[in-house]
Image (cartoon, rainbow, N blue to C red):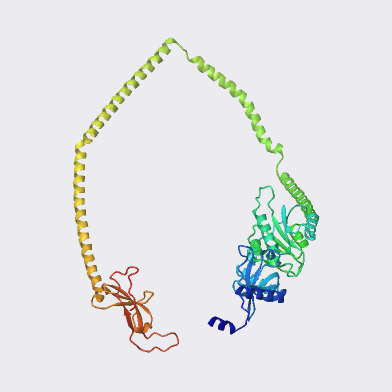
Amino acid sequence: MSDATSESRTNATEYTVSDISGALKRTVEDVFGNVRVRGEISGYRGPHSSGHAYFALKDDRARLDAVVWKTTMSRLKFRPEEGMEVIATGRLTTYPGKSNYQIVIDNLEPAGAGALMALLEERKRRLQAEGLFDAGRKRRLPFMPRVIGVITSPTGSVIRDIIHRIKDRFPLHVLVWPVRVQGETTAKEVTAAVNGFNALARDGAVPHPDLLIVARGGGSLEDLWGFNDEALARAAAASRIPLISAVGHETDWTLIDLVADVRAPTPTGAAEIAVPVKADLEATLASLGARLKAAVSRNFERKRQVVRAAARALPSPDQLLALPRRRFDEATSRLGRALSVSIERKRARLQGQRLTPATLSRRMNEARTLTGRDLARAQAAFFAIVRERRARFSRNAARLSPAPIARRQKLQADALTRLTRRQDQAISRRLDRLRGKLTQADRLLATLSHKAVLARGFALVKDADGAVVKHAAEVAPGMALSLEFADGAADAIATSGTATPTGGTAQPARPKAIARPAAKSREPGNQGSLF
């Protein structure tokens, strides 16, 4: 009877939670099937591991959850960034799992050039604070590069203009790294190109460039936005190869223009900056060669004139050789007569000496006598040296007997024994002094330790963080306390106190604590509890 009565009280239709959620989802999607929402990106942390991105759009009064699916994320022209004001196009839907609604974004664009300029200025300030725009860190361009690397679109007019201009001025080897110069992947591709050129080996199959040119034609701020990427600016600043930026027209400025070593107003201007004019170099070289040839000719002529002037001041060869020639002639005439006189003298001396056997025998006897005398002297000297060495050896042998060595060893052993005994005595006295100091320190520690105070009936109060509570004003009602006694510790809860929150007025009161003592040793699970 009671069940029938309760059913008759209302005739409202009964729905399940799923029915309500489905109805709301269809209603929201039908009414807001295609909307454009303007707001500031909040909570953006990059794409999820699944490739989807989840964040929120907000203004000064409301917040709307947003989601960008993986397929849509790859088609976006702009990568979402935290704090960026955007206009999102999509459809509203609900998420029954959390009973909230969200926008599924199909397209995302900046909310006007003002938002992009604000973001660009913020990046400029950050990079400038790091010193990436300083002129001192920028390198000089090579005067005559052998290989130039160009980073641009391979199908546009920019690459044709650059190659044509380089060919007209100074033909050389040009490497082209094809990239997209507009769209979502521009920054990533140009950054990879800069890093790729720097990674080339100097002796590899692909030649290492001496100069890099990053080029693109003119366009709007949105078209050139890929060259305002922070990662690209850092890659250009870190490039070991000098880099020329030629992005847009002369009035267009991007971040890569500020960090590049040289900024060219146009791609054609970059080609003109990169290489000199070959014809001008040849003309200059020909002019310098002619000047060098004329200077050498004039120098030779001056040297020739100096030699001629010096030659006129010098005497002639006949004058220089006249006196030596006369002396030679006189010496020649005297040489014949001197030779004849010398021959006559030698002949007279030879005829005055007669060689007989008696003379030869006498000379042999004299030589034999001298030889015998020298031999006797040598034998006497040898025997004298032997006697002296034998006497010296006898004296040394007497000094090298083992008795002195044994006496010295015994003296050293006695000295070592005395030193060992003195060392043991010194160590013993040192240990006694240290033991006495340790005993005094232990007695002083026992006297000054707070445990002696606790043994007289006092307790040490600490708060929940282990800090000592010294005043009653520091205790608040309900505050967890730890009481340490001489034989153990106990936990307690204060039932009253004087500490009040900030801005309150403290009422003097005596703190009370109700606790049950814990065991003597505060082991885990053995703490006091309230009763």
Picture quadrant where residue 135 is located? bottom right
Measured along the vertical axis of the image, is residue 354 above or below residue 275? above
Measured along the vertical axis of the image, is residue 378 above or below residue 443? above
Q: Position of residue 131 (x, y in %)?
A: 61, 67
Q: Is residue 293 visible?
A: yes
How many marks overall?
0
Q: On the rendered structure, is 498 left or right of 218?
A: left
Q: Position of residue 492 (x, y in %)?
A: 34, 78
Look at the image and tell me in which quarter the N terminus lies: bottom right
Q: Position of residue 120 (x, y in %)?
A: 67, 71
Residue placed farthest to the top in the image?
357
Picture quadrant where residue 255 is located? bottom right
Q: Is residue 138 visible?
A: no
In the image shown, does 18 or 275 lie closer to the viewer? Answer: 18
Q: On the rendered structure, is 172 left or right of 440?
A: right
Picture quadrant where residue 228 is located? bottom right
Measured along the vertical axis of the image, is residue 161 above or below residue 451? above
Measured along the vertical axis of the image, is residue 202 above or below residue 400? below
Q: On the rendered structure, is 42 left or right of 425?
A: right
Look at the image and tell me in which quarter the C terminus lies: bottom left
In the image shown, does 233 or 472 lie closer to the viewer? Answer: 472
In the image shown, does 392 or 60 lie closer to the viewer? Answer: 60
Q: Residue at x 59, y 21 (%)?
A: 340
In the image shown, does 154 or 424 lie closer to the viewer? Answer: 154
